[in-house]
Image (cartoon, rainbow, N blue to C red):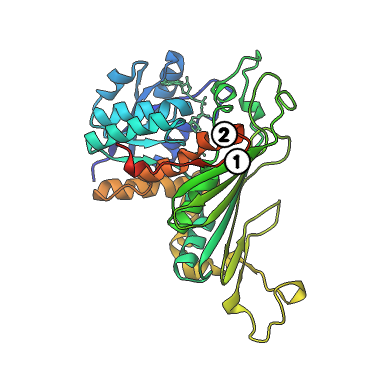
Amino acid sequence: MQPLQFGLVGAGGNNVGDRRGLSHARHLAALDAGQIVAVCDIVAEAAESAAAQLGATPYTDFEQFLRHGLDVVILATPDNFHAQQAALALEAGVAVISEVPATTTVEDGRRLVQAFRKSGGFYMLLENYGYRDEIELIRRLVQAGKFGEVYFGEGEYLHDCRGLNRFPDGSLTWRGRQFSTYVYIWHSLRPLLYILADRPTRVSAMTTMQPGRLEAEINIPDNVVSLIQTAAGRLLKIRVDIVSPRPHLMDYYAIQGTRGAFEGMRGFGDPPRIWLEELEPADRPGKSGPSVHWRALAEFEQEYIPDRVAARADAARTGHGGSDYWTMKAFVDAFRRGAPSPVDLYRALDCSLPGPLALESARQGGAPVEIPDPRTFA
Ligand SMILES: NC(=O)c1ccc[n+]([C@@H]2O[C@H](COP(=O)([O-])OP(=O)(O)OC[C@H]3O[C@@H](n4cnc5c(N)ncnc54)[C@H](O)[C@@H]3O)[C@@H](O)[C@H]2O)c1
């Protein structure tokens, strides 16, 4: 099979950011999927240094870069550029795989949908937390009916990002400038929507933000708790905090159904667990106290995600608990087969649009804000 020719936008290298774009070279290598043959960055030295490392051609002009002869563009630029650059790439006939989020505003999302429809191209959001083993396992258990009817879900993304907000001279990075304009909700929301095959319809959010309490001059909300209603009538509760001092907990999830419950890892060394009514003894006296049988989620892996268990050594070669491997594999498998995108533009917007809209709700004291269905965008 012909190796795919990838172009990377957003090389990183400012010593403060994550250099997320370059990490995708490692994910592609783990899958033997193709090469990054062109790198574009507005900072010439960043493009040149990454291109030299990868044996690729450097660019500073995005439109020139799009004419390199690429199959796929990887977008790893600051969040607010994703929608606009995705639209330009699709219009140029190049497939897009984009870092989170798909957009930071509803308007940019609408324009991206228009460009996507006009181009008939391929788009995938590289939201990786939804590709964690634990999420795939819960999804398959839900599909098998083990939880009964699931009506509540929960997610938390607690990540002290203060070290990413400023350059050493104190000036703001793109995160320092942008994180006050939306809630970083996608890594909590997309996995829940994936597990439940649902989409969000309304958000009501409140925040404890007090400008200056934790970071001078930046109005990044500390805790934001969003309540999201879904099309199927479920309620999702999502807490995001990207400034408070504390150890990270970026991947807490929980669900509640009529016949079972799932509680993710909450602290160091605390295993995810599930409770399933069907596994309880018939004479079980109650659902609390010593008679409750929480079971380690890991007990269900061999039966429900044998494919994941068998490929753990391969997945471990990438980041984020192996989820980066499964994200890129999902893309490569679908793209090569000409199959639909595993996280298509509409699903990408389902988890991205609530970001700015949750903050809009919080600014209005928690008033519910409608989340448009991107499938209906004119
Ligand atoms: N999914 C994940 O787990 C994960 C992890 C980290 C970062 N990310 C996402 O990856 C993206 C990149 O984050 P990062 O930490 O690598 O950032 P970074 O600051 O390290 O790198 C961004 C690069 O983009 C370049 N750039 C800025 N504007 C540009 C433009 N208009 N055109 C071309 N290049 C431009 C910058 O010069 C910089 O080199 C962000 O969207 C972030 O949210 C995702």
SS class, disc 2: helix
Type of amino acid at the residue the image marks with label 2: Leu
Tell me what residue is drawn at x 42 percent, y 14 percent: 44
Does the beta carbon at disc 1 come under 8 Å from ligand 1?
no
Q: Position of residue 45 (x, y in %)?
A: 45, 14
- CA gap between label 1 and label 2 equals 7 Å
Relative placement, left or right, of 196 versus 273 is left
SS class, disc 1: strand
Place residue 92 in its image quadrant.
Answer: top left
Q: Position of residue 231 (x, y in %)?
A: 44, 53
Q: Is residue 269 above or below residue 97?
A: below
Q: Position of residue 139 (x, y in %)?
A: 48, 61
Relative placement, left or right, of 118 versus 112 is left
Q: Is residue 130 above or below residue 48?
A: below
Type of amino acid at the residue the image marks with label 1: Ala
Q: Residue furthest right?
A: 289
- Binning the other alpha carbons within 10 Å of mark 1 as few (below 14), some (14 to 19) or many (20 upward) gives many
Tell me what residue is drawn at x 26 percent, y 24 percent: 68
- Residue sitting nearer the eye, 318 or 332: 332
- Residue sitting nearer the eye, 41 or 220: 220
Given contact means CB atoms under 8 Å apart, are the residues at marks 1 and 2 in contact?
yes
Q: Position of residue 204 (x, y in %)?
A: 57, 43
Relative placement, left or right, of 64 versus 238 is left
Does the beta carbon at disc 2 come under 8 Å from ligand 1?
no
Q: Residue furthest bottom?
A: 283
Residue on which the image places disc 1: 205
State the quadrant of the C terminus.
top left
On residue 359, the disc is 2
In this rendering, does residue 316 appear at all?
no
- Residue sitting nearer the eye, 209 or 343: 209
